[in-house]
Image (cartoon, grey):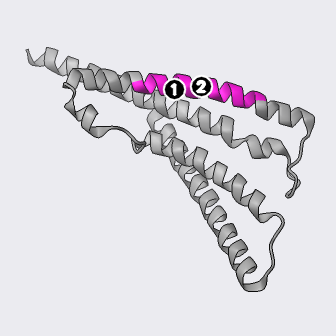
């Protein structure tokens, strides 16, 4: 586990940069498009499509980073009201459920990506391959599954260390 932690940390940082770049691109395109339409009466045919695709990239990459950092939405009051052993068990079950769902979603979205790849479909305005458009789905779900499994492994390791510490202290 200790060997994988630096690799997962680097992967998270790269994913965060990709999410930030996609979000910045999305924001820049929207600002330019709205400004051009308002000030010049000109609209760019590609702006909506490009902004949509960049937004999808930022959402899938950003949500995987948020999961890895424990920043996804939760019900803190409910979680904190539970006894510590139940809270830990619920957290581990949650990570396992997220990993399972994201693994299944990754496999399903990989089929969509593969279908777009084999058909050679292209997007209407930008005329880029649709497999590039669909790529954040399997990648994002795979990253979320990996990060959820990493969190699960970290919690299990912490529990085992606590058990060993209690056993050694007795």
Name above or below for residue 66 compared with residue 92: below
Query: What residue appears at the point 63 percent right and 28 percent down from the top-left corner?
Result: 105
Residue 10 in sight in this render:
no
Q: CA distance from mark 2 to mark 1?
A: 6 Å
Name above or below for residue 161 compared with residue 2: above
Residue at the extreme bottom of the image, as rendered:
39
Q: Who is closer to the viewer here, 66 or 169?
A: 66
Residue density around tag 2, few if under 14, some if 14–19, many if 20 or more, within 10 Å: some
Reading the image, the residue beneath label 2 is 103
Q: Quadrant of residue 38?
A: bottom right
Q: Who is closer to the viewer here, 68 or 52?
A: 52
Q: What are the residue bounds of the magenta stretch?
A: 94-111
Query: What residue appears at the point 29 percent right and 26 percent down from the top-left corner?
Result: 158
Circle count = 2
Side of 161 where 46 appears, left or right? right
Q: Who is closer to the viewer here, 150 or 167?
A: 150
Q: Quadrant of residue 89?
A: top left
């Amino acid at each position: 586990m200790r060997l994988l932690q630096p690799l997962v940390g680097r992967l998270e940082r790269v994913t965060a940069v990709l999410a930030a770049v996609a979000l910045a691109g999305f924001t820049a395109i929207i600002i330019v498009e709205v400004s051009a339409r308002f000030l010049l009466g000109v609209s760019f045919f590609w702006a909506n499509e490009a902004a949509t695709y960049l937004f999808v990239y930022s959402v899938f990459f950003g949500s995987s980073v948020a999961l890895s950092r424990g920043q996804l939405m939760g019900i803190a009051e409910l979680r904190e009201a539970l006894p510590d052993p139940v809270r830990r068990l619920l957290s581990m079950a949650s990570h396992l459920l997220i990993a399972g769902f994201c693994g299944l979603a990754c496999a399903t979205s990989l089929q969509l990506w593969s279908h777009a790849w084999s058909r050679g479909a292209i997007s209407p305005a930008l005329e880029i391959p649709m497999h590039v458009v669909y790529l954040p789905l399997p990648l994002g779900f795979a990253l979320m599954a990996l990060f959820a499994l990493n969190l699960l492994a970290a919690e299990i390791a912490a529990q085992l260390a606590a058990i060993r510490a209690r056993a050694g202290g007795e």
